[in-house]
Image (cartoon, grey):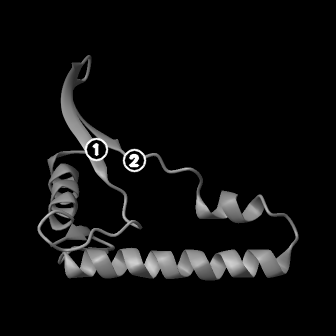
Amino acid sequence: MGAHELEVMLRINHFGQDGKPRSRNVIKLLDHFEINGPNGKHFCLVLEYMWHTVADFLRSYGDEPELRLAFAKIISQQLLEGLSFLHGSRIMHNGNGIKY
């Protein structure tokens, strides 16, 4: 991670503070700092804890198709809400990285 990722995360946090509602479906930057290590300077981003991947979460419910389908619908809705927030913040991700 580098300066570009930090800039994007700061932009996401900024859009949650200027009167626009912040999406609960977009991870939040809590802090950032630089450290010097044996291989040079490193950017460190402190982000909210992400409990599980979607695949791990769905896998933990075994072979209950009705429950898995219900969770898939909820997760899809949350994903679209997060993308809508990013779009409103004029941030997009494509195959070439993050743009704004």
| Camera sees residue 41 | no
The x, y position of residue 30, in whole percent, is 28, 44
Asked whether the residues under the numbered discs 2 and 1 touch, taking CB atoms below 8 Å apart as contact, a structural biologist would say yes
Is residue 27 rendered to the left or right of residue 30? right
The residue that appears at 21% across and 24% down in the rendered structure is: 35
- Mark 2 neighbour density, 10 Å: few (under 14) some (14–19) many (20 or more): few
Residue 85's place in the image compared with 32, above or below, is: below
- Residue at the outermost right position: 63
The residue that appears at 73% across and 81% down in the rendered structure is: 69
Q: Quadrant of residue 85?
A: bottom left
100 and 87: which is toward the camera: 87
74 and 38: which is toward the camera: 74
The x, y position of residue 47, in whole percent, is 35, 45
Q: Which mark is residue 30?
A: 1
Identify residue type, mark 1.
Leu
Residue 49's place in the image compared with 99, above or below, is: above
Q: Quadrant of the C terminus?
A: bottom left
Is residue 57 rendered to the left or right of residue 32? right
The x, y position of residue 41, in whole percent, is 18, 27
Q: Quadrant of residue 63?
A: bottom right
The CA span between labels 2 and 1 is 7 Å
Q: Which mark is residue 2?
A: none
Q: Quadrant of the N terminus?
A: top left
Q: Which mark is residue 48?
A: 2
The x, y position of residue 8, in whole percent, is 19, 59
What count of labels does the image hold?
A: 2
Identify residue type, mark 2.
Glu
Which of marks 1 and 2 precedes in the sequence? Answer: 1
